[in-house]
Amino acid sequence: MVEATARPRRHRSSTTRVVDAQAVIALADTAMIQILNDVGTRVWNLIDGHRSVQEIVAAVRGQLETEGYSSVSEGLDRDVEIFFEDLSAHGLITWSGAGS
Amino acid sequence: MTLPFETNLPEKPPPGSSPPEASPSDSSSWNRTLILSISGLRFELQGLPSELRSRLAVRFSRFVVEPDSVTRANLTIRVRPAVVRGYLDYDTHGQAKVYELETRVEEGRLHAWSYAFSGWFEIDGDQGELSLCDSDVEPPSHSIENFLRVAFAWKASKAGGFLFHASGLVRDGRAYVFFGPSGSGKTTVTRLYPHELQLNDDCIHITRAGSVFYAGGVPFKGCPEGGAQDAGAFPIAGLFRLVQSRNVACERLGAAEAMAEIATSVPFVSETPEGALRVFEAAEAMARTVPVMKLYFELAPSFWDVMEESLRG
């Protein structure tokens, strides 16, 4: 369960490069590489250790609705929560503030 | 760390089967030099014993160059006998064991060690040291090759290219590069086409000149019969990520997936954030220039026509 007020932070040994709107992330400690889709990339780009989960969700929802993807923003809260659980399980993020 | 390349430890030779490569007890005889030019990068090994120098000159014959007063080595490595019997523990309990090598970056140096060697080199500088044990598990010539593999990977990355865990064949002056995890068929592919020039069965140096990417031979082997048949560099026709399958097909990868697949096959350097970023930059540039495909193939020569047709498409 991810707390809405928790603040995610990218793992210090992660490296990111965005290619054609897809984030490619390498985690040096584990030699793992992940590719994120469009929404995942938007979320990842907003992770800075200061923004909370709910702030990130709101920002992504704003982007999608501005670009005309209102239907995609439905269910976004749950999708992003699952996404953060996956990122945490793969060691790509850590948490500060109210923990998960 | 278990290495991605396909190097298994040798069986212990029977007594009297071959002479020892070096005797660390007589350090005064460790005074020979060997210079290697590998795909545009120059490595100077100083302080070798005579017999080991001779053995390396044969092993790396296509890459040995004579010293000159003008060309400066990218890395000079001072070799010396180790004062210990070994480093990493080698204990198979009767089981085959895949080679292990450890690395660590500390204060601008890359430290690397395995069973019978320990060394370091300056990541941004041109100096290094290597201590060798007198070992049957990892003979000194193997130790030097494995240390050079790490050093070359880092120096190649600093120069804008990278060491790629892949095999390569040259046809009509163009390189066809095959990559994938251990067991995917990289070495097997090269054996299916013995009449083509083999760049290497295990790793290749990728470089760039303007918008053209080249695959160059390096002396590092994946198996005793492997290694480079040519020390030159050839423009790349395509990169093929191998997937063994009953059907033969080629599927072009998008830039992000191609970049990720390429980066996964770049050993050593990707272990630090700075190195990973350099690899990402080079991999993306290559993914946007060179066709990168998933090649579904079975272990028969029939896939080459499918490959060529995909490149034309």
Image (cartoon, coloured by chain):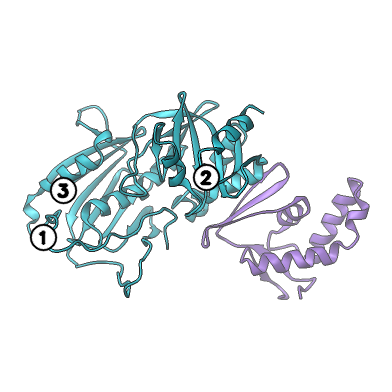
Chain colours: A purple, B cyan
Disc 3 versus disc 1: nearer the observer: 1
Q: Is residue B188 rendered to the left or right of residue A52?
A: left
Secondary structure, mark 1, is loop
Q: Residues within 10 Å of mark 2 (few under 14, many from 20)?
A: many
Query: Does A89 appear above or below A60?
Result: below
Would residue B50 be found to the left or right of residue A69 on screen? left
- On the question of residue B158 being in view, the answer is no
- Label 1, label 2: how far apart the Cα atoms are: 46 Å
Q: Is B305 placed above or below B129 here?
A: above
B152 displayed left or right of B253: left
Question: Mark 2 = which residue?
Answer: B279
Q: CA distance from mark 3 to mark 1?
A: 18 Å
Give the vertical position of A63 relative to B254 (above or below). below
Position above or below: B58 against A91 = above
Q: Is residue A1 visible?
A: yes
Q: Which residue bears the numbered disc 1?
A: B16
Give the percent coordinates (x, y) of residue A90. Answer: 63, 66
* Residue that carries the numbered disc 3 in the rendered image: B52
Nearer to me, B128 or A7: B128
Q: CB of mark 2 within 8 Å of CB of mark 3? A: no
Marks 3 and 1 on same chain: yes
Image quarter in which the N terminus of chain B is found: bottom left
Q: Residue at x 85, y 61 (%)?
A: A76
Who comes first in sequence, dot 3 or dot 1? 1
**At 14% from the left edge and 55% from the top edge, which residue is drawn?**
B18
Calculate the distance from the C-alpha at mark 2 to the C-alpha at mark 3: 34 Å
